[in-house]
Image (spheres, rainbow, N blue to C red):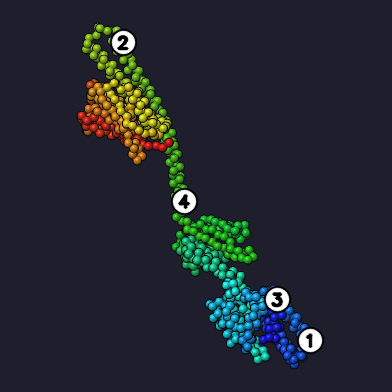
Amino acid sequence: MGTLGLGLSGWMEGGVALADGVVVVALVMVSAVLWRLGGAGRGSLWNRAVSTTVQGSLQETAERLNLALSAAQMGAWDWNLSQQTQFWSPQSKRILGLDPDTSLHRLEQWQDFIHPDDWPATQATVEQAIATQQDFTHQYRVRWPDGTWHWVSLYGRVVNQGGDQRLVGVLQNITDRKQAELSLRTSEARFRAVFEQAAVGMARLSPEGRWIQVNQRLCDLLGRPAESLLGQHFSVVTDAADQSQDAMYYQRLIRGEQRSCQFEKRYLHGEGHAVWTLVTVSVESDESDDIAAFIAIIEDVTERKAAREELLRRAEELATTNLMLARTTALLERRNSELDQFAYVTSHDLKAPLRAISNLADWISEDLAGQIPEENQRQLALLKSRVQRMEALINGLLEYARIGRRERPITEVDVAQLLHSVIDSLAPPSGFRVQVADEMPRLYTHQTALGQVFANLIGNAIKHHHRGQGTITIHCRTQADALEFCVSDDGPGIAPQYHEKIFTIFQTLKARDDFESTGVGLSVVKKIVESEQGRVWLVSALGEGSRFYFTWPLAEG
Protein backbone atom coordinates (compact mmCIF):
# COMPACT_ATOMS: atom_id res chain seq x y z
CA MET A 1 0.00 0.00 0.00
CA GLY A 2 2.84 2.37 0.81
CA THR A 3 4.40 2.22 -2.67
CA LEU A 4 1.04 2.56 -4.37
CA GLY A 5 0.07 5.39 -2.08
CA LEU A 6 3.20 7.32 -2.92
CA GLY A 7 2.60 6.82 -6.61
CA LEU A 8 -0.99 7.96 -6.51
CA SER A 9 -0.47 10.90 -4.23
CA GLY A 10 1.64 12.56 -6.88
CA TRP A 11 -1.06 12.72 -9.53
CA MET A 12 -4.52 11.70 -8.29
CA GLU A 13 -5.80 15.19 -7.59
CA GLY A 14 -9.11 16.75 -8.69
CA GLY A 15 -11.40 14.82 -11.02
CA VAL A 16 -13.59 14.73 -14.07
CA ALA A 17 -17.19 13.73 -14.63
CA LEU A 18 -17.28 10.07 -15.58
CA ALA A 19 -18.56 9.03 -19.00
CA ASP A 20 -19.40 5.32 -18.88
CA GLY A 21 -16.58 4.68 -16.42
CA VAL A 22 -13.77 5.94 -18.69
CA VAL A 23 -12.00 7.77 -15.90
CA VAL A 24 -12.22 4.84 -13.54
CA VAL A 25 -10.84 2.54 -16.22
CA ALA A 26 -7.96 4.90 -16.95
CA LEU A 27 -7.34 5.37 -13.26
CA VAL A 28 -7.16 1.66 -12.64
CA MET A 29 -4.88 0.98 -15.60
CA VAL A 30 -2.40 3.67 -14.70
CA SER A 31 -2.51 2.96 -10.99
CA ALA A 32 -1.91 -0.73 -11.63
CA VAL A 33 1.16 0.00 -13.74
CA LEU A 34 2.47 2.50 -11.24
CA TRP A 35 1.91 -0.01 -8.45
CA ARG A 36 4.09 -2.45 -10.30
CA LEU A 37 6.67 0.17 -11.12
CA GLY A 38 6.72 1.08 -7.48
CA GLY A 39 8.44 -2.22 -6.79
CA ALA A 40 11.67 -0.78 -8.22
CA GLY A 41 12.61 0.41 -4.83
CA ARG A 42 12.59 -3.20 -3.69
CA GLY A 43 14.76 -4.45 -6.58
CA SER A 44 11.93 -5.93 -8.65
CA LEU A 45 13.28 -7.91 -11.60
CA TRP A 46 10.22 -7.02 -13.70
CA ASN A 47 10.67 -3.31 -13.03
CA ARG A 48 14.30 -3.43 -14.11
CA ALA A 49 13.16 -4.94 -17.42
CA VAL A 50 10.80 -2.05 -18.20
CA SER A 51 12.40 0.32 -20.56
CA THR A 52 12.90 3.96 -19.85
CA THR A 53 10.60 4.80 -22.77
CA VAL A 54 7.70 2.90 -21.20
CA GLN A 55 8.22 4.63 -17.86
CA GLY A 56 8.16 8.00 -19.53
CA SER A 57 4.97 7.13 -21.37
CA LEU A 58 3.29 6.02 -18.19
CA GLN A 59 4.39 9.13 -16.36
CA GLU A 60 2.99 11.30 -19.17
CA THR A 61 -0.35 9.43 -19.01
CA ALA A 62 -0.48 9.90 -15.24
CA GLU A 63 0.13 13.64 -15.57
CA ARG A 64 -2.63 13.97 -18.17
CA LEU A 65 -5.06 12.10 -15.97
CA ASN A 66 -4.05 14.22 -13.02
CA LEU A 67 -4.82 17.41 -14.97
CA ALA A 68 -8.21 16.04 -16.04
CA LEU A 69 -9.14 15.09 -12.49
CA SER A 70 -8.00 18.47 -11.17
CA ALA A 71 -10.19 20.28 -13.68
CA ALA A 72 -13.27 18.47 -12.35
CA GLN A 73 -12.27 18.89 -8.68
CA MET A 74 -12.24 15.17 -7.98
CA GLY A 75 -10.16 13.31 -5.44
CA ALA A 76 -8.71 9.82 -5.72
CA TRP A 77 -8.92 6.95 -3.25
CA ASP A 78 -7.44 3.46 -2.96
CA TRP A 79 -8.74 0.75 -0.61
CA ASN A 80 -6.59 -2.36 -0.09
CA LEU A 81 -9.13 -4.99 0.82
CA SER A 82 -6.50 -7.56 1.74
CA GLN A 83 -4.74 -5.29 4.23
CA GLN A 84 -7.91 -3.25 5.14
CA THR A 85 -6.08 0.03 4.61
CA GLN A 86 -7.22 3.10 2.69
CA PHE A 87 -5.50 5.90 0.89
CA TRP A 88 -7.25 9.24 0.26
CA SER A 89 -5.62 11.94 -1.83
CA PRO A 90 -5.41 15.49 -0.43
CA GLN A 91 -8.29 16.57 -2.71
CA SER A 92 -10.43 13.70 -1.42
CA LYS A 93 -9.78 14.84 2.13
CA ARG A 94 -10.83 18.35 1.20
CA ILE A 95 -14.06 16.92 -0.25
CA LEU A 96 -14.59 15.19 3.11
CA GLY A 97 -14.07 18.54 4.86
CA LEU A 98 -10.68 17.51 6.27
CA ASP A 99 -7.26 19.09 6.24
CA PRO A 100 -5.08 17.49 3.50
CA ASP A 101 -2.56 16.41 6.18
CA THR A 102 -5.19 14.50 8.17
CA SER A 103 -4.39 10.81 8.63
CA LEU A 104 -7.17 8.68 7.14
CA HIS A 105 -6.25 5.01 6.56
CA ARG A 106 -8.85 2.84 8.30
CA LEU A 107 -12.34 1.80 7.23
CA GLU A 108 -13.78 2.87 10.56
CA GLN A 109 -12.58 6.41 10.01
CA TRP A 110 -14.35 6.59 6.63
CA GLN A 111 -17.53 5.10 8.07
CA ASP A 112 -17.63 7.76 10.79
CA PHE A 113 -18.06 10.46 8.14
CA ILE A 114 -21.06 8.82 6.42
CA HIS A 115 -24.63 9.69 7.35
CA PRO A 116 -26.14 6.84 9.41
CA ASP A 117 -29.08 6.58 7.03
CA ASP A 118 -26.75 6.24 4.04
CA TRP A 119 -24.27 3.70 5.47
CA PRO A 120 -26.33 0.51 4.86
CA ALA A 121 -26.77 1.32 1.15
CA THR A 122 -23.11 2.36 0.83
CA GLN A 123 -21.91 -0.85 2.46
CA ALA A 124 -24.23 -2.95 0.28
CA THR A 125 -22.98 -1.23 -2.90
CA VAL A 126 -19.34 -1.89 -2.04
CA GLU A 127 -19.98 -5.52 -1.08
CA GLN A 128 -21.90 -6.14 -4.31
CA ALA A 129 -19.07 -4.62 -6.39
CA ILE A 130 -16.55 -6.91 -4.69
CA ALA A 131 -18.76 -9.96 -5.16
CA THR A 132 -19.51 -9.23 -8.84
CA GLN A 133 -16.16 -7.68 -9.71
CA GLN A 134 -18.05 -4.84 -11.44
CA ASP A 135 -17.60 -1.07 -11.54
CA PHE A 136 -19.88 0.90 -9.25
CA THR A 137 -21.12 4.41 -8.51
CA HIS A 138 -22.84 5.54 -5.34
CA GLN A 139 -24.00 8.82 -3.73
CA TYR A 140 -24.11 9.46 -0.01
CA ARG A 141 -23.85 12.22 2.58
CA VAL A 142 -20.78 12.98 4.67
CA ARG A 143 -20.52 15.15 7.74
CA TRP A 144 -17.85 17.75 7.88
CA PRO A 145 -16.11 18.61 11.15
CA ASP A 146 -18.26 21.77 11.40
CA GLY A 147 -21.39 19.59 11.55
CA THR A 148 -22.74 20.37 8.07
CA TRP A 149 -23.75 17.62 5.67
CA HIS A 150 -22.49 17.39 2.09
CA TRP A 151 -23.30 15.10 -0.81
CA VAL A 152 -20.48 13.15 -2.52
CA SER A 153 -20.43 10.74 -5.44
CA LEU A 154 -18.19 7.67 -5.29
CA TYR A 155 -16.90 5.97 -8.47
CA GLY A 156 -14.83 2.75 -8.20
CA ARG A 157 -13.61 -0.58 -9.61
CA VAL A 158 -12.31 -3.81 -8.13
CA VAL A 159 -8.65 -4.54 -9.05
CA ASN A 160 -6.72 -7.75 -8.35
CA GLN A 161 -2.96 -7.24 -8.43
CA GLY A 162 -0.08 -9.17 -6.96
CA GLY A 163 -2.35 -11.32 -4.85
CA ASP A 164 -4.03 -8.26 -3.29
CA GLN A 165 -7.60 -7.19 -3.96
CA ARG A 166 -8.17 -3.46 -4.06
CA LEU A 167 -10.93 -0.94 -4.74
CA VAL A 168 -9.72 2.18 -6.54
CA GLY A 169 -11.68 5.19 -7.75
CA VAL A 170 -12.47 8.87 -7.45
CA LEU A 171 -14.63 11.02 -5.16
CA GLN A 172 -16.56 14.14 -6.20
CA ASN A 173 -18.44 16.79 -4.18
CA ILE A 174 -21.96 16.99 -5.69
CA THR A 175 -23.63 19.04 -2.95
CA ASP A 176 -24.58 21.93 -5.21
CA ARG A 177 -25.88 19.62 -7.92
CA LYS A 178 -27.78 17.52 -5.38
CA GLN A 179 -29.37 20.59 -3.81
CA ALA A 180 -30.36 21.77 -7.26
CA GLU A 181 -31.86 18.35 -7.98
CA LEU A 182 -33.72 18.35 -4.66
CA SER A 183 -34.99 21.86 -5.31
CA LEU A 184 -36.07 20.81 -8.77
CA ARG A 185 -37.85 17.75 -7.42
CA THR A 186 -39.53 19.87 -4.75
CA SER A 187 -40.58 22.40 -7.36
CA GLU A 188 -41.86 19.65 -9.63
CA ALA A 189 -43.77 18.05 -6.76
CA ARG A 190 -45.26 21.41 -5.86
CA PHE A 191 -46.20 22.02 -9.48
CA ARG A 192 -47.80 18.59 -9.73
CA ALA A 193 -49.79 19.21 -6.56
CA VAL A 194 -50.97 22.59 -7.82
CA PHE A 195 -51.62 21.13 -11.25
CA GLU A 196 -53.73 18.24 -9.98
CA GLN A 197 -55.54 20.08 -7.19
CA ALA A 198 -56.21 23.37 -9.00
CA ALA A 199 -59.79 24.62 -8.95
CA VAL A 200 -59.46 25.41 -12.67
CA GLY A 201 -58.55 23.29 -15.64
CA MET A 202 -54.80 23.04 -16.34
CA ALA A 203 -52.91 21.40 -19.16
CA ARG A 204 -49.54 21.14 -20.87
CA LEU A 205 -49.45 20.99 -24.65
CA SER A 206 -46.62 20.12 -27.00
CA PRO A 207 -45.22 22.77 -29.36
CA GLU A 208 -47.39 21.13 -32.02
CA GLY A 209 -50.51 21.85 -29.95
CA ARG A 210 -51.23 18.34 -28.64
CA TRP A 211 -52.34 17.59 -25.09
CA ILE A 212 -49.51 15.96 -23.14
CA GLN A 213 -50.81 16.48 -19.59
CA VAL A 214 -54.28 17.38 -18.27
CA ASN A 215 -55.67 17.63 -14.74
CA GLN A 216 -58.94 16.16 -13.49
CA ARG A 217 -60.68 19.54 -13.31
CA LEU A 218 -60.18 20.03 -17.04
CA CYS A 219 -61.53 16.55 -17.74
CA ASP A 220 -64.60 17.34 -15.64
CA LEU A 221 -65.04 20.71 -17.35
CA LEU A 222 -64.96 19.13 -20.83
CA GLY A 223 -66.81 15.99 -19.82
CA ARG A 224 -64.06 13.83 -21.29
CA PRO A 225 -61.63 11.29 -19.77
CA ALA A 226 -57.92 12.11 -19.89
CA GLU A 227 -57.27 9.21 -22.27
CA SER A 228 -59.48 10.78 -24.93
CA LEU A 229 -57.54 14.07 -24.77
CA LEU A 230 -53.90 13.03 -24.48
CA GLY A 231 -52.17 13.06 -27.85
CA GLN A 232 -55.06 14.91 -29.51
CA HIS A 233 -54.70 18.36 -31.05
CA PHE A 234 -56.50 21.09 -29.10
CA SER A 235 -58.54 21.98 -32.19
CA VAL A 236 -60.35 18.62 -31.99
CA VAL A 237 -62.36 19.82 -28.96
CA THR A 238 -62.61 23.48 -30.03
CA ASP A 239 -65.90 24.92 -31.27
CA ALA A 240 -65.78 25.60 -35.00
CA ALA A 241 -66.65 29.27 -34.43
CA ASP A 242 -63.41 29.75 -32.45
CA GLN A 243 -60.99 27.81 -34.66
CA SER A 244 -59.66 30.86 -36.50
CA GLN A 245 -59.10 32.77 -33.24
CA ASP A 246 -57.17 29.82 -31.76
CA ALA A 247 -55.00 29.55 -34.86
CA MET A 248 -54.15 33.26 -34.68
CA TYR A 249 -52.98 33.10 -31.05
CA TYR A 250 -51.12 29.83 -31.65
CA GLN A 251 -49.13 31.35 -34.54
CA ARG A 252 -48.25 34.40 -32.45
CA LEU A 253 -46.86 32.17 -29.72
CA ILE A 254 -44.96 29.96 -32.17
CA ARG A 255 -43.39 32.98 -33.91
CA GLY A 256 -42.37 34.47 -30.57
CA GLU A 257 -44.53 37.56 -31.02
CA GLN A 258 -46.09 36.87 -27.62
CA ARG A 259 -44.96 34.87 -24.60
CA SER A 260 -48.50 34.59 -23.23
CA CYS A 261 -52.06 35.37 -24.21
CA GLN A 262 -55.58 35.28 -22.79
CA PHE A 263 -58.86 34.92 -24.62
CA GLU A 264 -62.36 33.48 -24.35
CA LYS A 265 -63.32 30.45 -26.39
CA ARG A 266 -65.80 27.60 -26.56
CA TYR A 267 -64.82 23.98 -26.07
CA LEU A 268 -67.00 21.08 -27.13
CA HIS A 269 -68.27 19.17 -24.11
CA GLY A 270 -68.37 15.41 -24.27
CA GLU A 271 -72.17 15.61 -24.30
CA GLY A 272 -72.14 17.84 -27.35
CA HIS A 273 -72.86 21.33 -25.97
CA ALA A 274 -70.44 24.27 -25.96
CA VAL A 275 -68.62 25.34 -22.80
CA TRP A 276 -67.48 28.95 -22.55
CA THR A 277 -64.00 29.24 -21.04
CA LEU A 278 -61.33 31.84 -20.30
CA VAL A 279 -58.01 30.47 -21.55
CA THR A 280 -54.61 31.76 -20.43
CA VAL A 281 -51.64 30.29 -22.32
CA SER A 282 -47.94 30.84 -21.55
CA VAL A 283 -44.76 29.45 -23.08
CA GLU A 284 -42.59 26.94 -21.22
CA SER A 285 -39.01 27.31 -22.52
CA ASP A 286 -36.12 24.84 -22.50
CA GLU A 287 -32.44 25.58 -21.82
CA SER A 288 -32.02 26.93 -25.35
CA ASP A 289 -34.99 29.26 -24.86
CA ASP A 290 -36.93 27.28 -27.45
CA ILE A 291 -40.55 26.31 -26.86
CA ALA A 292 -40.65 23.12 -24.80
CA ALA A 293 -44.40 23.18 -24.14
CA PHE A 294 -47.40 25.41 -23.59
CA ILE A 295 -49.01 25.80 -20.15
CA ALA A 296 -52.77 26.42 -20.38
CA ILE A 297 -55.10 27.51 -17.58
CA ILE A 298 -58.72 26.96 -18.57
CA GLU A 299 -61.50 28.46 -16.44
CA ASP A 300 -65.20 27.75 -16.88
CA VAL A 301 -66.93 31.09 -17.46
CA THR A 302 -70.25 29.81 -18.76
CA GLU A 303 -72.22 31.28 -15.87
CA ARG A 304 -70.16 34.47 -15.92
CA LYS A 305 -70.75 34.79 -19.66
CA ALA A 306 -74.49 34.27 -19.21
CA ALA A 307 -74.54 36.81 -16.36
CA ARG A 308 -72.63 39.32 -18.50
CA GLU A 309 -75.04 38.88 -21.37
CA GLU A 310 -77.94 39.27 -18.96
CA LEU A 311 -76.36 42.45 -17.59
CA LEU A 312 -75.94 43.80 -21.11
CA ARG A 313 -79.58 43.00 -21.85
CA ARG A 314 -80.67 44.67 -18.62
CA ALA A 315 -78.44 47.65 -19.42
CA GLU A 316 -80.14 48.00 -22.78
CA GLU A 317 -83.53 47.74 -21.10
CA LEU A 318 -82.45 50.31 -18.51
CA ALA A 319 -81.22 52.66 -21.22
CA THR A 320 -84.56 52.31 -22.99
CA THR A 321 -86.43 52.86 -19.72
CA ASN A 322 -84.30 55.91 -18.91
CA LEU A 323 -85.05 57.34 -22.32
CA MET A 324 -88.75 56.78 -21.78
CA LEU A 325 -88.52 58.31 -18.31
CA ALA A 326 -86.67 61.31 -19.70
CA ARG A 327 -89.37 61.79 -22.29
CA THR A 328 -92.10 61.28 -19.69
CA THR A 329 -90.41 63.70 -17.30
CA ALA A 330 -90.14 66.29 -20.04
CA LEU A 331 -93.81 65.72 -20.88
CA LEU A 332 -94.82 66.01 -17.22
CA GLU A 333 -92.82 69.20 -16.85
CA ARG A 334 -94.55 70.59 -19.90
CA ARG A 335 -97.96 69.48 -18.57
CA ASN A 336 -97.19 70.94 -15.13
CA SER A 337 -96.21 74.19 -16.74
CA GLU A 338 -99.43 74.18 -18.72
CA LEU A 339 -101.40 73.29 -15.58
CA ASP A 340 -99.77 76.11 -13.64
CA GLN A 341 -100.61 78.49 -16.45
CA PHE A 342 -104.16 77.15 -16.59
CA ALA A 343 -104.58 77.47 -12.82
CA TYR A 344 -103.23 81.00 -12.88
CA VAL A 345 -105.46 82.08 -15.78
CA THR A 346 -108.49 80.31 -14.27
CA SER A 347 -107.86 81.93 -10.92
CA HIS A 348 -107.52 85.33 -12.52
CA ASP A 349 -110.62 84.88 -14.68
CA LEU A 350 -112.70 83.62 -11.76
CA LYS A 351 -111.56 86.33 -9.40
CA ALA A 352 -112.28 89.16 -11.85
CA PRO A 353 -116.11 88.86 -11.76
CA LEU A 354 -115.96 88.20 -8.00
CA ARG A 355 -114.15 91.47 -7.50
CA ALA A 356 -116.72 93.19 -9.70
CA ILE A 357 -119.60 91.75 -7.62
CA SER A 358 -117.87 92.75 -4.39
CA ASN A 359 -117.25 96.28 -5.69
CA LEU A 360 -120.86 96.55 -6.90
CA ALA A 361 -122.15 95.53 -3.46
CA ASP A 362 -119.93 98.17 -1.85
CA TRP A 363 -121.17 100.83 -4.25
CA ILE A 364 -124.82 99.98 -3.59
CA SER A 365 -124.23 100.12 0.15
CA GLU A 366 -122.51 103.47 -0.14
CA ASP A 367 -124.94 105.05 -2.62
CA LEU A 368 -128.07 103.92 -0.82
CA ALA A 369 -126.80 104.39 2.68
CA GLY A 370 -129.75 104.76 5.06
CA GLN A 371 -132.27 103.88 2.32
CA ILE A 372 -131.78 100.10 2.22
CA PRO A 373 -134.12 98.05 4.35
CA GLU A 374 -132.53 95.91 7.06
CA GLU A 375 -133.34 92.69 5.20
CA ASN A 376 -131.64 93.96 2.06
CA GLN A 377 -128.61 95.04 4.11
CA ARG A 378 -128.35 91.49 5.51
CA GLN A 379 -128.54 90.08 2.01
CA LEU A 380 -125.81 92.45 0.74
CA ALA A 381 -123.57 91.39 3.67
CA LEU A 382 -124.28 87.73 2.85
CA LEU A 383 -123.40 88.44 -0.79
CA LYS A 384 -120.07 89.95 0.17
CA SER A 385 -119.24 87.01 2.50
CA ARG A 386 -120.02 84.55 -0.29
CA VAL A 387 -117.70 86.47 -2.61
CA GLN A 388 -114.91 86.40 -0.01
CA ARG A 389 -115.50 82.66 0.57
CA MET A 390 -115.33 82.03 -3.17
CA GLU A 391 -112.09 83.97 -3.48
CA ALA A 392 -110.58 82.08 -0.53
CA LEU A 393 -111.71 78.81 -2.11
CA ILE A 394 -110.04 79.74 -5.40
CA ASN A 395 -106.81 80.62 -3.58
CA GLY A 396 -106.95 77.34 -1.64
CA LEU A 397 -107.49 75.32 -4.82
CA LEU A 398 -104.61 77.07 -6.49
CA GLU A 399 -102.29 76.35 -3.57
CA TYR A 400 -103.45 72.74 -3.33
CA ALA A 401 -102.78 72.18 -7.04
CA ARG A 402 -99.26 73.53 -6.75
CA ILE A 403 -98.17 71.25 -3.87
CA GLY A 404 -95.41 68.85 -4.94
CA ARG A 405 -95.04 70.39 -8.39
CA ARG A 406 -92.82 73.30 -7.55
CA GLU A 407 -89.06 73.12 -7.10
CA ARG A 408 -88.16 74.18 -3.57
CA PRO A 409 -84.57 74.47 -2.34
CA ILE A 410 -83.37 72.44 0.65
CA THR A 411 -81.79 74.61 3.30
CA GLU A 412 -80.80 74.32 6.92
CA VAL A 413 -83.84 75.20 9.01
CA ASP A 414 -83.88 76.24 12.65
CA VAL A 415 -87.39 75.08 13.63
CA ALA A 416 -87.54 77.44 16.63
CA GLN A 417 -86.86 80.47 14.42
CA LEU A 418 -89.25 79.20 11.77
CA LEU A 419 -92.09 78.90 14.35
CA HIS A 420 -91.34 82.36 15.67
CA SER A 421 -91.73 83.78 12.14
CA VAL A 422 -94.95 81.80 11.50
CA ILE A 423 -96.54 82.88 14.79
CA ASP A 424 -95.54 86.47 14.17
CA SER A 425 -97.16 86.44 10.69
CA LEU A 426 -100.39 84.91 12.08
CA ALA A 427 -100.64 87.60 14.76
CA PRO A 428 -102.80 85.52 17.18
CA PRO A 429 -105.50 87.44 19.10
CA SER A 430 -104.45 88.64 22.52
CA GLY A 431 -106.42 85.88 24.24
CA PHE A 432 -104.35 83.12 22.67
CA ARG A 433 -100.90 81.89 23.70
CA VAL A 434 -98.67 79.75 21.47
CA GLN A 435 -96.07 77.85 23.48
CA VAL A 436 -93.05 76.29 21.75
CA ALA A 437 -91.08 73.60 23.55
CA ASP A 438 -87.42 74.20 24.32
CA GLU A 439 -84.58 72.82 22.15
CA MET A 440 -86.37 72.56 18.85
CA PRO A 441 -84.21 70.77 16.24
CA ARG A 442 -82.31 72.01 13.23
CA LEU A 443 -82.59 70.09 9.97
CA TYR A 444 -82.13 70.32 6.22
CA THR A 445 -85.51 70.52 4.48
CA HIS A 446 -87.94 72.62 2.43
CA GLN A 447 -88.46 75.57 4.75
CA THR A 448 -91.52 77.01 2.99
CA ALA A 449 -93.38 73.68 3.03
CA LEU A 450 -92.72 73.06 6.75
CA GLY A 451 -93.67 76.63 7.57
CA GLN A 452 -97.00 76.28 5.71
CA VAL A 453 -97.87 73.11 7.64
CA PHE A 454 -97.26 74.88 10.95
CA ALA A 455 -99.19 77.97 9.80
CA ASN A 456 -102.26 75.93 8.77
CA LEU A 457 -102.34 73.86 11.97
CA ILE A 458 -101.82 76.86 14.30
CA GLY A 459 -104.30 78.98 12.31
CA ASN A 460 -106.92 76.19 12.45
CA ALA A 461 -106.46 75.81 16.22
CA ILE A 462 -107.15 79.52 16.71
CA LYS A 463 -109.94 79.77 14.11
CA HIS A 464 -111.93 76.77 15.36
CA HIS A 465 -111.51 77.43 19.08
CA HIS A 466 -114.85 77.63 20.89
CA ARG A 467 -113.67 80.40 23.20
CA GLY A 468 -112.02 83.73 22.66
CA GLN A 469 -108.91 82.56 24.46
CA GLY A 470 -106.81 79.41 24.56
CA THR A 471 -103.39 77.81 24.57
CA ILE A 472 -101.63 76.11 21.68
CA THR A 473 -98.56 73.98 22.41
CA ILE A 474 -95.91 72.72 19.95
CA HIS A 475 -93.36 70.05 20.79
CA CYS A 476 -91.13 67.58 18.93
CA ARG A 477 -89.41 64.24 19.44
CA THR A 478 -86.81 62.45 17.30
CA GLN A 479 -87.48 59.06 15.72
CA ALA A 480 -85.02 56.80 13.85
CA ASP A 481 -85.09 58.70 10.57
CA ALA A 482 -87.70 61.41 11.11
CA LEU A 483 -88.98 64.07 13.47
CA GLU A 484 -92.44 63.81 15.03
CA PHE A 485 -94.12 67.17 15.65
CA CYS A 486 -97.29 67.75 17.64
CA VAL A 487 -99.54 70.83 17.57
CA SER A 488 -102.08 70.59 20.42
CA ASP A 489 -104.82 72.93 21.60
CA ASP A 490 -107.42 73.16 24.34
CA GLY A 491 -110.31 73.69 21.92
CA PRO A 492 -113.65 71.82 21.68
CA GLY A 493 -112.10 68.62 20.30
CA ILE A 494 -113.22 66.47 17.38
CA ALA A 495 -115.19 63.25 17.55
CA PRO A 496 -113.23 60.15 16.39
CA GLN A 497 -115.59 59.46 13.46
CA TYR A 498 -114.45 62.70 11.82
CA HIS A 499 -110.69 62.19 12.22
CA GLU A 500 -110.25 61.09 8.59
CA LYS A 501 -112.95 63.28 7.09
CA ILE A 502 -111.35 66.55 8.13
CA PHE A 503 -108.31 65.86 5.89
CA THR A 504 -110.49 65.58 2.79
CA ILE A 505 -110.63 68.67 0.61
CA PHE A 506 -113.74 70.89 0.98
CA GLN A 507 -114.91 68.95 4.07
CA THR A 508 -115.98 71.03 7.11
CA LEU A 509 -117.62 70.05 10.40
CA LYS A 510 -119.87 73.12 10.49
CA ALA A 511 -122.15 74.63 7.87
CA ARG A 512 -120.36 77.33 5.92
CA ASP A 513 -123.22 79.77 6.55
CA ASP A 514 -122.70 79.26 10.30
CA PHE A 515 -118.87 79.24 10.18
CA GLU A 516 -116.84 80.61 7.32
CA SER A 517 -114.36 77.93 6.09
CA THR A 518 -113.13 76.65 2.74
CA GLY A 519 -112.34 73.11 3.93
CA VAL A 520 -108.97 73.23 2.19
CA GLY A 521 -106.48 73.97 5.02
CA LEU A 522 -106.07 70.46 6.49
CA SER A 523 -106.11 68.82 3.06
CA VAL A 524 -103.19 71.09 2.14
CA VAL A 525 -101.39 69.98 5.32
CA LYS A 526 -101.93 66.30 4.46
CA LYS A 527 -100.72 66.72 0.88
CA ILE A 528 -97.59 68.63 1.88
CA VAL A 529 -96.64 66.12 4.61
CA GLU A 530 -97.18 63.12 2.34
CA SER A 531 -95.23 64.74 -0.49
CA GLU A 532 -92.29 64.85 1.97
CA GLN A 533 -92.72 61.09 2.70
CA GLY A 534 -94.27 61.77 6.10
CA ARG A 535 -97.73 61.15 7.56
CA VAL A 536 -100.27 63.17 9.58
CA TRP A 537 -102.92 62.04 12.06
CA LEU A 538 -105.21 63.36 14.77
CA VAL A 539 -105.72 62.34 18.40
CA SER A 540 -108.85 64.00 19.84
CA ALA A 541 -112.23 63.58 21.48
CA LEU A 542 -115.10 66.00 22.14
CA GLY A 543 -114.31 68.30 25.03
CA GLU A 544 -110.64 67.19 25.26
CA GLY A 545 -108.95 69.45 22.74
CA SER A 546 -107.05 68.24 19.66
CA ARG A 547 -103.49 66.97 19.03
CA PHE A 548 -102.34 67.02 15.42
CA TYR A 549 -99.24 64.85 14.83
CA PHE A 550 -97.11 64.73 11.72
CA THR A 551 -93.72 63.23 10.84
CA TRP A 552 -91.05 64.99 8.82
CA PRO A 553 -88.05 63.14 7.37
CA LEU A 554 -84.54 63.95 8.52
CA ALA A 555 -82.09 64.86 5.79
CA GLU A 556 -78.36 65.50 6.22
CA GLY A 557 -76.82 68.53 4.64
Q: Residue at point 58% right, 82% down?
A: 108
Looking at the picture, tell me which residue is in the foreground, 371 or 53.
53
x%, y% of residue 285? 60, 64
Q: Look at mark 3 in the image and give the residue it sits on.
A: 68
Pointer 1 with pointer 2, Cβ within 8 A: no
- Tell us which disc is closer to us: 1 or 4: 1
Pointer 4 with pointer 3, Cβ within 8 A: no
Quadrant of the image containing the C terminus: top left
Q: Look at mark 4 in the image and give the residue it sits on.
A: 308
In the rendered view, tell whether residue 428 sits above or below residue 541: above
Pointer 4 with pointer 2, Cβ within 8 A: no
Looking at the picture, tell me which residue is in the foreground, 11 or 479.
11
- Tell us which disc is closer to us: 4 or 2: 2
Q: Look at mark 1 in the image and give the residue it sits on.
A: 52
Amino acid type at image mark 2: Trp
x%, y% of residue 128? 57, 85
x%, y% of residue 397? 33, 26
Amino acid type at image mark 4: Arg
Q: Earlier in the sequence, mark 1 or mark 2?
A: 1
- Residue 363: assigned label: 2
Q: Earlier in the sequence, mark 1 or mark 3?
A: 1
Q: Residue at point 26% right, 25% down?
A: 470
Amino acid type at image mark 1: Thr
- Tell us which disc is closer to us: 4 or 3: 3
Quadrant of the image containing the N terminus: bottom right
